[in-house]
Image (tube, helix red, strand yellow):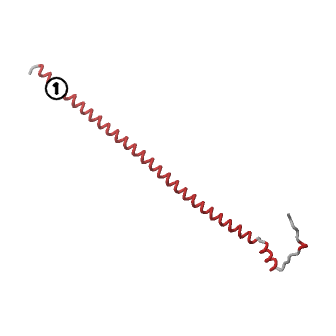
Amino acid sequence: MNNTAIKKVEKKQSIKQASRKNQQKLVYQIDVMSVKMFLMSAIVAIVILVVATTIISMNNRITKTQTEIAKIEQKTKALNNENEDLKLKAADLMSNSRLEKIAEKAGLNLNDNNMRNVK
């Protein structure tokens, strides 16, 4: 073979080698990009999972607090009703007619001379 033919063959081989190197670089770049995309997807998924868990946790706390508030309101209503009943009973126990009946049973009588009117 002559010198020119050898140079052409060598040039073709160097082009093939350069092409192979470029292909290997491209494959390596694609692999790096795939890994980066996977990592970014994983990070986004983790962030979404954390946010969703936080929202669910907050909703559970809100529901629990609302339940506690409802129980407290129910107890407050019951205590207010009991208070009203006790006020009515106290008023009934202090009524003049009742006191007069008790005094009569005890043998006490009403003497106008011993009475004072206080304003």
Where is 9 relative to 112, above or below? above
- Residue 5, given in percent of the width and then of the height, sits at 11, 22
Whether 58 is drawn above or below 118: the answer is above
Q: In this view, does 55 lie to the left or right of 93?
A: left
Instruction: Say which element carries label 1.
Output: helix
Residue extending farthest to the right is: 113
| Quarter of the figure with the N terminus | top left
Could you tell me which residue is drawn at 41 percent across and 46 percent down?
A: 46
Please state if 85 lies on the left or on the right of 29 as rendered.
right
Residue at x 21% of width, y 31% of height: 20
Q: In the image as oriented, which residue stretches furthest toward the top?
A: 3
Quadrant of the drawing holding the C terminus? bottom right
Q: Name the outermost residue toward the left.
A: 1
Residue 105 occupies which quadrant of the picture?
Answer: bottom right
Residue 106 lies, in percent from the top left, at 81, 79
Q: Report the label total.
A: 1
Q: Where is residue 78 in the image (x, y as percent from the top left)?
A: 62, 65
Viewer-proximal residue, 116 or 37?
116
Percent x, y for residue 52?
Answer: 44, 49
Left or right: where 62 falls relative to 38: right
Callout 1 amino acid: Lys
Mark 1, Cα crowd under 10 Å, few <14 / some 14-19 / many 20+, is: few
Return the residue nearer the eye: 81 or 23.
81
In the depicted view, which residue is nearer to us: 114 or 20?
Answer: 114
| Residue found at x 74% / y 71% | 92
Q: Is residue 42 above or below residue 104?
A: above
Judging by the rendered image, the residue that carries numbered circle 1 is: 12
* Residue appearing at x 29%, y 34% in the figure: 29
